[in-house]
Image: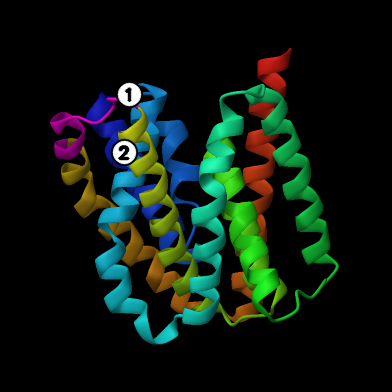
Amino acid sequence: MTDLTVLAAATLAAGFLRGVTGFGFALAAVPFYSLSVPPLQAVILAQMLQIAAAPTDVVANWRHLDRRALGLLCAGAIVCTPLGAYFATRLDADVMRLAIAVVVLLGLFALLAKLRIPEGRIPAIAAGGIAGLLGGLAAMPGPPAVAYFLGRGADKATSRASLLLFFAFTASIALASLALGADVLSWAMLWQAAAMYPLMLAGTWAGTLLFRRLGDGHYRSAALGVLFLSAILTGVKGLGGLL
């Protein structure tokens, strides 16, 4: 397949996953983007697309948002993302990937055991802070935020809508950090993102159709499955780098 075909197929598939669960776009897209473009460019392309989709997501999901929880998550993320980026330049990346995989698996087991996360400011800010920390360390802000909504027993519409907006926010922080820290952005990347944007919307639309057919229990199962996949992929990547 040509590079453009790989990018298009990855964008459609990742958009579908995003439409079903509200997260997982970068998890699915970046590995396949990296087959055609350098890894950093793959991350930036995924971030651009998530940011570009935010206005559409706001309009489509505004009435389902948990605005209070979303604001608290974002407050935690904006403080801790730079801290994660700081440690990312000083710690071994593969060791951190293994540590993150273990943390995600422990959180997954806690969710399977139906551990409940209490309401209140502290749990929300803590989840946002950990998400920002992991996002800065390894571009993986998803698991803490997903665990927060699932652990509170939030309904599928609220969980999905809030996660879509939260990840657009964390992508904005990450992209701004990259733009300020290094000369990595180019017009070519913007044109590439513009070309992939309709495909992401198409994939998201198809995934949304499936989402509407899922009950809360099936949505929870799909979200837990994506979390498990993220832990395995991250752990394998870290282990491969150490061996």
Q: Is residue 6 left or right of residue 139?
A: left
Say how many tags the image has. 2
Quadrant the C terminus occupies: top right
Which residue lies most toward the right here? 113
Under mark 2, the amino acid is Leu
Which residue lies most toward the bottom here? 63
Judge by depth and name the residue closer to the eye, 179 or 7: 179
Q: Is residue 82 left or right of residue 35?
A: right
Determine which quarter of the picture holds residue 97. Answer: top right
In the rendering, which numbered label is found on residue 8?
A: none
Relative to residue 14, is residue 164 depicted above or below? below
Q: Are marks 1 and 2 in contact (CB under 8 Å)?
A: yes
Under mark 1, the amino acid is Val
Determine which quarter of the picture holds residue 165. Answer: bottom left
Judge by depth and name the residue closer to the eye, 131 or 204: 131
Q: Is residue 54 visible?
A: yes
Mark 1 vs mark 2: in front: 2
- What is the secondary structure assignment of the residue under circle 1? loop
Q: Residue at x 49, y 58 (%)?
A: 23
Relative to residue 5, is residue 105 depicted above or below? below
What residue did someone put label 1 on? 37
What residue did someone put label 2 on? 45
Q: Residue at x 45, y 80 (%)?
A: 65
Q: Earlier in the sequence, mark 1 or mark 2?
A: 1
